[in-house]
Image: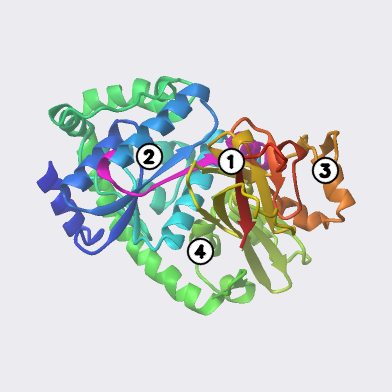
Amino acid sequence: MLDQVRHFIQEHALFNLETDTLLVAVSGGQDSVALAEVLHQLGAQFAVAHCHFGLRGDEADADEQFVRKLAKKYEVPYFVEFFQTKAFAEQEGISTQMAARALRYEWFERIRRTQGLTYIATAHHQRDAAETMLLNLTHGTGLAGLHGIPPKNGHIVRPLLGIGKPELFEYLVENQLMWREDASNDSPVYQRNRLRQEVLPVLRDINPNLDQTLQFTAERVGGAEEIVRRYVQDTAAQAQRTEADATYLDIRLLQKTAATTLVLHELLRPFGFSFPVVKDIVAAFPAESGRRFESPTHRLVKDREQLVITPKNLTKFGTHQLQAGQEVLKIDGLHLRLELQEVTEAFEVPRGKAVAALDADALKFPLIVRPWQEGDWFMPIGMKGKKKLSDFLIDQKVPLNLKDNVQVLCSGDGKIAWVIGFRPDERFRVNEDTERVLVVKRM
């Protein structure tokens, strides 16, 4: 199988095994464990990324620990994100599966970019591509949906896409690899599972080589899509302007294209806008300025003769862990430096909003950095009673549009130790009994 994967990587020019570095998405299931092992045996340089979506309780915690140990086994960097998936899904009015997809790919790209990695590798295989193609057809789709999952899409690569599910399982058994089972993969609540359990067996009775047949069909559709892509690319060169904070599309130039809705859908595909929403956008071309449209990841506003597209801030739906001994945490818009100090006669508690001195022995690890939430409370240093964080921010006169940026540092037991950039918590203040101090600085 290693030769098959190597050939597939070369045939589709996915990446260079010798020079490129990968961020490998690992859930702990069969497919992603196989991918990590294959890349390891092929000599690829990679880091491991794991998403904890906060949906499966102790099982998800066990998955995270399993993947952490797997990364340690390969002696590669490990990144984990703890998402508030349900909160994001409820805010956007989308399914938890759609929410999880939007959150994970935004985070993968952020890690890839900040860590200087070349590509993001996922463990999609031949059967995944077939299932995706049929699901897309069921829901209604264009050319992109009919070719299923592409081997390479921007910075995302799928080295296992030419491998069948039976071959992957055989590889796991031959190499005596362990993996985690996700019970939700068998739940009929999810459409993909119903397709996998009820529909595909019937289709495979009709055509035992269904996965391969659909792969060949996808290749032919992909050729047709390439023709469309070049037309869309020419349109984008004239109608699209990208700046640091937004993307702009010229409505008058879009209206001159053949099949305007189709072309605009292709232009907006990277921003997550569905075809029905794109139809509404086109219908709003003659309308007044200010019409607003949403995708899970972006916001589009009609402003006079242009469409303005801006990204949403998805980082507020994630949390970050700080392990014991960790000295630095860098995430978008936040850079923390930690130093453990022994208390001596010469020690002085540092002052200022950008630093917190915390009683290290009162903290439980791992520490957690997350956005503040409604219902949060803490005990501002110098006070003996509780205070709602929402009231505290009002007292601090924090502007409404900046409140979403406020982060809290929590002890592993959930207690807020520091409202970052504002005030530590009384329960973790340095006192006469403190022996060790954790100094946390916002850089």
In this rendering, the answer to whether 215 lies above or below 441 is above
Residue at the limit of the structure toward the right, as seen here = 395
**Closer to viewer: mark 1 or mark 3:** 1
* Amino acid under disc 2: Thr
Disc 4 target residue: 267
Residue 180 occupies quadrant? top left
* Amino acid under disc 1: Ile
Label 3 close to label 4 by CB (< 8 Å): no
Q: For the point 68% across and 34% down, which residue is it?
A: 415
Nearer-N-terminus badge (4/2): 2
Q: For the point 70% across and 39% down, which residue is it?
A: 428
Q: For the point 16% across and 33% down, which residue is it?
A: 171
For this view, does 243 lie left or right of residue 145?
Answer: right
Nearer-N-terminus badge (1/4): 4
Residue 198, visible in the rendered structure: yes
Is residue 75 inside the magenta stretch?
yes
Label 2 close to label 1 by CB (< 8 Å): no
Crowdedness near tag 2: few (<14), some (14–19) or many (≥20) residues, C-alpha within 10 Å:
some
Disc 2 target residue: 132
Q: Secondary structure at mark 4?
A: helix
Residue 295, visible in the rendered structure: no
Label 1 close to label 4 by CB (< 8 Å): no
On residue 368, the disc is 1
- Magenta residues, start to end: 73-91
Q: Determine the CA span between mark 1 and mark 4.
A: 38 Å
Q: Can you give x and y, in whole percent of width and height, for residue 27 in the image? A: 38, 36
For this view, does 188 lie left or right of residue 407?
Answer: left
For this view, does 65 lie left or right of residue 175?
Answer: right
Residue 226 occupies quadrant? bottom left
Q: Determine the CA span between mark 1 and mark 3.
A: 19 Å
On residue 390, the disc is 3
Residue at the limit of the structure toward the left, as seen here = 3
